[in-house]
Amino acid sequence: MRVMVIGGGGREHALVRGLAKSPRVDEVLCVPGNAGTAAIAENVPLSNDDHSALVDLARERMIDLTVVGPEGPLCDGIVDTFQAAGLRIFGPTAEAARLEGDKAYAKKLMKAAKVPTAEARIFQRYREAKEYVATRESGVVVKAAGLAAGKGVAVCRDPADGLLALERMMVDRAFGAAGETVLVEELLKGEELSVFALVDGNTIFVLESAQDHKAVGDGDTGPNTGGMGAYSPAPVATAEVMATVERDILVPIVDALNREEVRYQGMLYAGLMLTPGGPKVLEFNCRFGDPETQAVLMRLDSDLFELLFAAVDGRLEEAEARWDPRSAVCVVMASRGYPGKYDSGKVITGLEKLAGAEDVCVFHAGTKKIEHLTVSSGGRVLGVTALGEDIAAARQRAYAALGEIHFENAYWRTDIAGKGIRAAAARL
Ligand code: AMP
């Protein structure tokens, strides 16, 4: 089988690695990929926006399965284009991907399906939104309804900050058209949890749980990023919690989509807050999370290709997955300055020391090859991921591996998985 992965970050490196391991897969292409994917797949330098060029490539190279990493191409209808061309592709159609791409739509669907989520009001007029926030006495969360690369959410402990966030989105148009509609939500408190599930239209196949760290700084300080690290499994995801999430959240939302004749096929990722009143949805994503995927897939002992292929073919009912019972921790090495301005083109050294390391994998995110050198080419550069008997052991191994790698102005959080270790201790 020939497989193509769309995207070029750490998530895609983890997907490529998982797919390339399958005995059924002969060849993997990654578009555009990075220096990490280049070592195990063929990188093709095409834009993810040019869907018809991607269809041509899939046809030319006789690709049996395309797997889409990022949300952008999904929300822009890449799956619709591939399906119309008779090509197999893993991921939801543009209509189904609205669950991520349009938070106002997702909120309405959750309400209709009685899926527990933060209370929210939806606004298209700045004046009305402002009046509403001004009446609030506790914190609010202001969200741009459209896609904003994970940056369109402002968690405001003080309603006055909510007013500033509204102004930035609706008046200054910081997120362009994505902020024309905004949601003002109640601020939920509790532990966060990400649950990944494969969906084939009907069957929901829940994968393992993970937790990520969004803020750039230690102790969850500073602005939000795409994610500075992750660990799996999440100790807060007890069997009971996972069963509740499946029964009260995943099943009703897929049913609600089906009632609207929207078939959801692909990854359904629920970002949750575990509140005293039970798990509540913060957001749905229509693709694998980054960097949670690096931690989750590190633990997958089954054939990733078989699982994704089964989802596309509507055969998830027969699917099985074996997981490494150990924990995985992924620590992101970023370029100093990220998520703001940062320098690229820094030579990365030490990677060869980890090439054969057992239970350690360095996933590349923003890297590229210049002749024989590997250089940084993005904000998030590497995801150093390790397995260990428990979260603490995995974390120690990940940081030890990270210590072998160097590039100028490298930056990382020093407390990744700390909250997981605390949650695990609290459960004992
Ligand atoms: P989202 O992209 O909607 O998941 O939001 C990004 C981050 O903002 C989440 O991971 C949470 O940390 C936080 N967040 C979003 N919605 C809420 C909410 N209603 N209450 C508290 N925190 C939230």
Image (cartoon, rainbow, N blue to C red):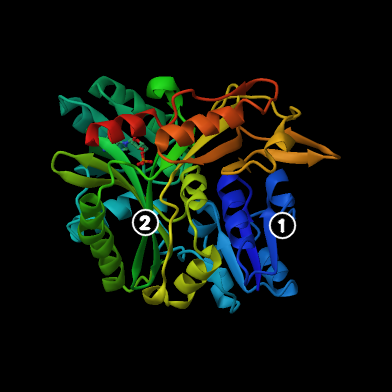
User: Residue 32: percent from the left, percent from the top?
Assistant: 69, 52
Identify residue for label 1. 41
Q: Which quarter shows the N terminus?
A: bottom right
| Left or right of 11 on screen, residue 243 | left
Label 1 residue SS: loop
User: Residue 76: percent from the left, percent from the top?
Assistant: 52, 58
Can you tell me whether the CB of the residue at mark 2 lies under 8 Å from the nearest atom of ligand 1?
A: no
Mark 1 nearby-residue class (10 Å; few <14, some 14–19, many ≥20): many
In which quadrant of the rendered view does residue 126 lie?
top left
Q: Quadrant of ligand 1?
A: top left
User: Residue 409: percent from the left, percent from the top?
Assistant: 65, 20
Q: Is residue 225 visible?
A: no
User: What residue is at 29 percent from the left and 45 percent from the top?
Assistant: 272
| Left or right of 275 on screen, residue 43 | right
- Front one among 107 and 352: 352
User: Residue 427: percent from the left, percent from the top?
Assistant: 23, 36
User: What residue is at 30 percent from the left and 35 percent from the top?
Assistant: 424
Mark 2 to mark 1 CA distance (whole Å): 31 Å
Give the mark nearest the N terminus, 2 or 1.
1
| Left or right of 175 on screen, residue 5 | right
Residue type, label 1: Ala
State whether residue 31 is above or below residue 368.
below
State whether residue 402 is above or below residue 148.
above
User: What residue is at 39 percent from the left and 66 percent from the top?
Assistant: 199
Q: Please identify the residue farthest to the bottom as the structure is shown.
A: 86
Q: Which quarter shows the C terminus?
A: top left
Identify residue for label 2. 99
| Left or right of 349 on screen, residue 121 | left
